[in-house]
Amino acid sequence: MDWSKLPDLAAVAALTCAFASVARRGQTTASRHWLSGWVLIAVHFAAEIFAPAPGVWGMVAFDVGLISLCWAGVLFMWASVPYRADRSGIWMLVSVLATNAFYIVIIGFDHPWPWALTLAAVSFGAAPLTIALTARRDFTHLLRWLLVGIYCVLSVFLLTVQNQPGIGVEIASNGLMFTVYIGCCLHVWYSYRGRGTAGSLITIAGFLGWASVFVAAPLARMITPGGQIDGEVWNLPKYVVAVGMILLLLEDQIEHNKYLALHDELTGLPNRRLFLDRLAISLERARRMESKAALLVIDLNHFKQVNDTLGHHAGDLLLKKVSNLFVSRVRRSDTVARTGGDEFSLILEEPTNRSNAKSVAKSLMDMMNEPIQVGEHSMQVGASIGVAVFPDDAADIEALCIAADLRMYDDKHVSREGTAERIPVKSEPLPELHRDEEEEFKITARGPKA
């Protein structure tokens, strides 16, 4: 038994637990692949403890340790692939895992059969290439061809060196591991190439160092046969990668929290805070360019009945459907926000005017008067819309919001009285409100809805 590996096992196990604790707070498919990879690294160190055992058990421990190290790298690589759910992508993963395991089992024998070595080496390039060519009409991606390319190069390298007497098998196994971890480096670089954060840079550098170990360690033994470098030096890149991945998870969670602070969690639309920021920018731009900006406030008329009769789940699905309809109707430069339970607000950027704003309002109102299919239910909720134009109706954010709200409530009042034909959105300027009336309106109009 090689108990000198026990501290490494303890260190990796502690890092894996820390990684799992961080990943649990914001679990993604990538983080699950990373966590599985670190579990395999722990298995690798555990197997290395028993690898020196004589006989078949030592050989099994050697194979398990090497396969675990190899599969961990493949999972790290796979976590950066954006087409993981594609069927051909799953076949690609299975083929890479199987060919790696097959080759490691073959070289684990004291005297591997040459024909088996050749077959295993050829399969490294042939299996991924066959899958990529078969699926190229349905799906293709740069990372897929990168994976195929590096494994084809590995296949040629193995065929060249593996049958050399003495050190051929050792060079082949190091070449295999170098290919896996340089592949990790390239995949992570591709995924985070525009990020430039500490987590991405440390992870990329760690994988580059990890791959370099499989070249530097054999060279060091060849150059200084009598010298011995502490094994912890070669394990250092593993810990660098672990730290980098933990930083990436923390960075992702911080970005997600920032997103939730400015967006509605249900619909993904900007919330009231981000909406007010964008409205301020829009009005300032319109003031500077001496142009106009329009604000539309939309309230769903019968949303409460949907919640009461069909439940909150149906109400949530309806809100998502309505938000998608609104986004599809306006320009990309405009802003659609969810500013209340069943209230949405739209900012129509320049170029716009009252006529355009009324046209958009009528289009949205017509959409809401049509039945909306949500699951098995068809809902006709209707909407009340208030339109206010800057600077015609108001000269600042607060007054513009009050103007749009007043017109929306006026439209709702008309619809409740059962008007046979919905009147157009009113466009005449509102009379000025006294300060006391303004304060009273803000308290009532912006209170919680029933």
Image (tube, grey):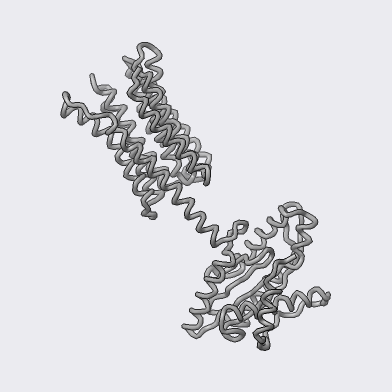
Residue projecting furthest to the top? 55
Where is 15 relative to 224, above or below? below
Where is 147 relative to 408, above or below? above
Is residue 71 visible in this depiction of the protein?
no
Where is 412 relative to 179, above or below? below
> Which quadrant of the view contains residue 55?
top left
The x and y percentages for residue 318 are 70, 58
Please tell me which residue lies in front, 10 or 51: 10
Q: Residue at x 73, y 54 (%)?
A: 312
Residue projecting furthest to the front? 436
The x and y percentages for residue 68 are 41, 28
> Which quadrant of the view contains residue 63?
top left
Is residue 168 visible in this depiction of the protein?
yes
Please tell me which residue lies in front, 316 or 70: 316
Where is 374 relative to 157, above or below? below
The x and y percentages for residue 242 are 39, 40
